[in-house]
Image (cartoon, rainbow, N blue to C red):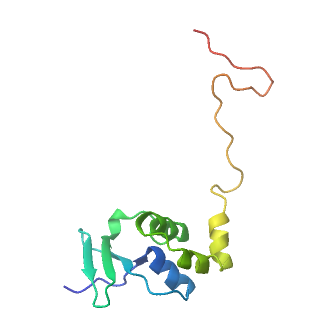
Amino acid sequence: MPHPNPRLYLGYESLIRRFSLRVPPLQRIFVTTEQTMEKHTFTPDGSERIELPLRRLSDPESYAGQLTFALKREHLNLTVLGALFEHEEARDGVQEPRWPGQIPPPLATPNSPRQDGRIMTTRV
């Protein structure tokens, strides 16, 4: 059965390819597939190739999505992370604010101070 093209690498492998990191080869490589089942294949050099259904992944193409995937599904690889954070683009991607503009204010709760200084209370 032919592999669908193009393949999208996931996790550390995608980050290695995106930033051309010079690190030792990984023992586990994650890629996407159009198939519906997860598939594990071992190569002659002893590494494992894991194919994951694309539709089960959320945001597989963003930098943050790849880093999150790597930290959740793969062993912590300080060699890759160290090489990755030597790139300014990678550091900036981690330090971006979560919301555009200003962070929204917290919701008012009972017993929280009001803007006029009085405390809202609940009566029982």
Residue 26 point in image, percent of width and height = 42, 82
Residue at the image point whose x is 63% and y is 76% from the top: 85
Q: Is residue 69 above or below residue 111?
A: below
Numbered circles on residues, count: 0
Q: Nearer the viewer, residue 113 or 84?
A: 84
Residue 46 point in image, percent of width and height = 31, 86
Q: Residue furthest right?
A: 116
Q: Residue furthest left?
A: 1
Task: For the N terminus, give its image quadrant.
Answer: bottom left
Q: Nearer the viewer, residue 41 or 103?
A: 41
Quadrant hosting residue 58 = bottom left
Quadrant hosting residue 32 = bottom left
Residue at the image point whose x is 62% and y is 66% from the top: 94
Q: Is residue 123 above or below residue 111?
A: above
Viewed as shown, does residue 64 lie left or right of 56?
Answer: right
Task: For the C terminus, give its image quadrant.
Answer: top right
Residue 28 point in image, percent of width and height = 37, 78
Residue at the image point whose x is 62% and y is 15% from the top: 122
Q: Is residue 84 above or below residue 75?
A: below
Quadrant hosting residue 81 = bottom right
Q: Nearer the viewer, residue 70 or 33?
A: 70
Q: Is residue 101 above or below residue 68?
A: above
Residue at the image point whose x is 49% and y is 64% from the top: 68
